[in-house]
Image (tube, rainbow, N blue to C red):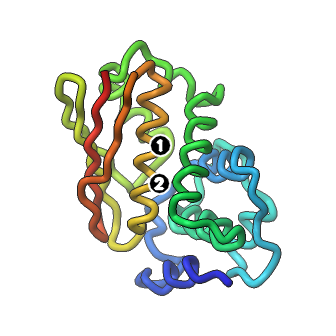
């Protein structure tokens, strides 16, 4: 029943205890629960994941990155979402998060160029131990996310592309395209364009 979650946990060096130095704001999980309109799992989950879904921490609290990924995968498994449905859900979630009062100041900058200048700051508001680098061009950018081995999956990389798209659109980007151009167990590269 929890196939994606079980595969993810098995890929980690010490299961859900892996990479304690990598944390993410609870706002990411809370946005997924609030905007997604999906049911959370009721049973059969690892205790840490079950507790996180039963009582999500306040938006400003840091939670382990692997637990956040695991909780998202548990919801995906419970709702039997296809990859396409996952990407639609994460896009809606990321739009909701980018437009929330907590992150609107960063996301609603005057242009995608300005948003990308502040991208590391915005990323740092959400993630620690998972690094973002940005190479900007005119109407384009290449973003690279680096993380510990297997902390993120290819599906997480694809979902992250929807987050970058949501931020660029929220910063008044037109015809925004964000493509996952490279996905590896320890990093992903995204090619972004807009007009």
Q: Residue at x 72, y 79 (%)?
A: 47
Give percent across and percent down for residue 29.
64, 53
Neighbours of disc 2 within 10 Å: few (<14), some (14-19), many (20+):
many
Q: Residue at x 74, y 72 (%)?
A: 50
- Mark 1 lies on a secondary structure that is helix
Given residues 76 and 116, the one toward you in this image is 76
User: What residue is shown with label 2?
Assistant: 159
User: What residue is shown with label 1?
Assistant: 163
Give percent across and percent down for residue 75.
68, 66
Identify the disc placed on residue 53.
none
Q: Are marks 2 and 1 in contact (CB under 8 Å)?
A: yes
The quadrant in which the N terminus is found is bottom right
Q: Is residue 32 above or below residue 92?
A: below
Q: Left or right: 119 with respect to 90?
A: left
How far apart are the alpha carbons under marks 2 and 1?
7 Å
The quadrant in which the C terminus is found is top left
Q: Residue at x 56, y 84 (%)?
A: 6
Q: Is residue 146 above or below residue 171?
A: below
Neighbours of disc 1 within 10 Å: few (<14), some (14-19), many (20+):
many
């Amino acid at each position: 029943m929890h196939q994606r979650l079980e595969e993810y946990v098995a890929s980690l060096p010490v299961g859900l205890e892996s990479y304690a130095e990598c944390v993410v704001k609870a706002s990411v999980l809370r946005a997924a629960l609030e905007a997604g309109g999906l049911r959370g799992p009721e049973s059969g989950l690892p205790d840490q994941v079950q507790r996180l879904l039963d009582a999500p921490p306040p938006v400003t609290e840091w939670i382990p990155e692997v637990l956040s990924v695991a909780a998202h995968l548990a919801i995906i498994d419970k709702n039997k979402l296809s990859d396409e449905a996952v990407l639609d859900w994460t896009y809606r979630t990321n739009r909701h998060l980018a437009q929330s009062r907590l992150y609107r100041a960063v996301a609603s900058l005057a242009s995608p160029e300005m948003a990308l200048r502040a991208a590391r700051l915005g990323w740092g508001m959400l993630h620690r131990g998972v690094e973002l680098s940005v190479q900007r061009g005119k109407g384009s950018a290449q973003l690279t996310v680096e993380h510990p081995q297997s902390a993120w999956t290819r599906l997480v990389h694809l979902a992250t592309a929807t987050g970058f798209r949501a931020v660029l659109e929220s910063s008044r980007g037109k015809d925004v395209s964000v493509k996952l151009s490279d996905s590896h167990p320890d990093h992903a590269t995204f090619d972004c364009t807009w007009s």
